């Protein structure tokens, strides 16, 4: 009887030590977790595309209908030693796209892309930040919130990066009161 109890205690202690050691190493479960942002992220060479999404249309339905245009929101960072250019943006679900504003991602800086972005360059904390706009034109099918849409960004030197973009969260509170129900309607 004593051997059985001792054997169980040793096995229990060994299992506890093994479990305690699971998170003690340098490689942990959280080392591969992505940041809690709405958009997609990816990299092509020294160019990083961050928080990329279709801008929310800020309407109650929040979907983009077939034939409509969808502006994009994202940040492009260039950690390389030389400038690069955003050459094109394509999607199999769009007839085309337009790129407005600054297309050059200056070395060591960030290019902010969004529907409200201007076309100038401002100075922020020793880092030039450029502004641009990108709009996917003529969507071929409806894009709903929660659905991902493949979009390819092509840079002159860094090359292409394809990301699956969601629709971003609304940029303002939406007051989407449902139609009033007649008195006595069940629910």
Image (cartoon, rainbow, N blue to C red):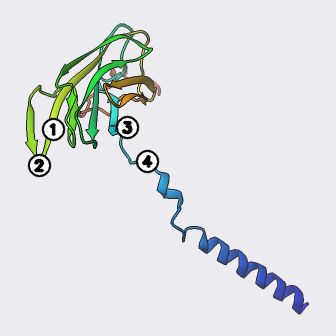
Residue drawn at x 35%, y 7% is 67
Residue named by callout 2: 126
Determine the residue positioned at 88% across, 92% down: 2
- Checking the image for residue 45, the label placed there is 3
Residues at marks 3 and 4 touching, judged by CB atoms closer than 8 Å: no
Determine whether the residue tagged by mark 2 lies in a helix, strand or loop. Answer: loop
Q: Which element type, helix, strand or loop, lies under badge 4?
A: loop
| Of callouts 1 and 4, the N-terminal one | 4
Tell me where residue 8 sits by quadrant. Answer: bottom right
Q: Quadrant of residue 10?
A: bottom right
x%, y% of residue 175?
26, 29
User: For this rendering, which residue is in front, 40 or 158?
Assistant: 158
Label 1 environment density (alpha carbons within 10 Å; few <14, some 14–19, many ≥20): many
Looking at the image, is 109 positioned above or below residue 28? above
Instruction: Determine whether, in the image, residue 112 is placed left or right of residue 181.
Output: left
Q: Is residue 184 visible?
A: no
Cα distance in 3D space between marks 1 and 3: 20 Å
Alpha carbons under labels 2 and 4: distance apart: 27 Å
* Badge number at residue 34: 4
In-front residue for pair 75/88: 88
């Amino acid at each position: 009887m004593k051997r059985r109890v001792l054997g169980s205690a040793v096995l229990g202690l060994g299992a506890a030590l093994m479990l305690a050691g699971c998170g003690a190493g340098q490689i942990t479960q959280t080392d591969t977790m992505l940041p809690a942002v709405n958009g997609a992220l990816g990299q092509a060479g020294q160019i990083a595309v961050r928080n990329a999404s279709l801008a929310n249309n800020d309407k109650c339905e929040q979907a983009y209908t077939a034939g409509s245009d969808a502006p994009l929101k994202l940040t492009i960072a260039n950690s390389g030693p030389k400038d690069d250019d955003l050459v094109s943006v394509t999607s199999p679900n769009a007839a085309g796209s337009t790129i407005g504003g600054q297309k050059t991602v200056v070395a060591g800086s960030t290019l902010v892309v969004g529907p409200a972005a201007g076309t100038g360059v401002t100075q922020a904390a020793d880092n030039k930040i450029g502004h641009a706009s990108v709009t996917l034109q003529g969507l071929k099918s409806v894009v709903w919130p929660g659905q991902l849409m493949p979009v390819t960004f092509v840079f002159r030197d860094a090359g292409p990066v394809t990301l699956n973009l969601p629709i971003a969260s609304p940029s303002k509170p939406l007051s989407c009161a449902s139609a009033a129900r007649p008195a006595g309607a069940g629910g």
